[in-house]
Amino acid sequence: MTNKQVEISMAEWDVMNIIWDKKS
């Protein structure tokens, strides 16, 4: 994976964590 792909994956995880935090 390229650095750009890693950055996008990390950003997606951040979004998922924020969404889950708001659900609970």
Image (cartoon, rainbow, N blue to C red):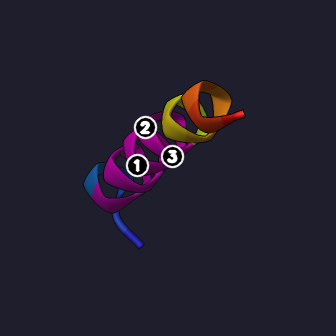
- The residue sitting at 61% across, 41% down in the picture is 20
**Magenta segment main secondary structure:** helix
Q: CA distance from mark 1 to mark 2?
A: 5 Å
Question: Among all residues in the image, which is located at the extreme bottom?
Answer: 1
Q: Nearer the viewer, residue 2 or 17?
A: 17
* Residue matched to label 2: 15
Counting from the top left corner in percent of width and height, residue 16 is at 51, 46
Counting from the top left corner in percent of width and height, residue 6 is at 43, 54
Kindly identify the amino acid type of the residue bearing the numbered disc 3: Met
* Residue matched to label 1: 12
* Residue matched to label 3: 16
Counting from the top left corner in percent of width and height, residue 8 is at 32, 50
Kindly identify the amino acid type of the residue bearing the numbered disc 1: Glu
Span of residues in magenta: 5-16
Neighbourhood count class around disc 2 (C-alpha, 10 Å): few under 14, some 14–19, many 20 upward:
few
Q: CA distance from mark 3 to mark 2?
A: 4 Å
Magenta run includes residue 6: yes
Neighbourhood count class around disc 1 (C-alpha, 10 Å): few under 14, some 14–19, many 20 upward:
few
Query: Element at badge 1?
Result: helix
Query: Element at badge 2?
Result: helix
Contact, mark 1 vs mark 2 (Cβ under 8 Å): yes
- The residue sitting at 27% across, 51% down in the picture is 4
Contact, mark 3 vs mark 1 (Cβ under 8 Å): yes
Neighbourhood count class around disc 3 (C-alpha, 10 Å): few under 14, some 14–19, many 20 upward:
few
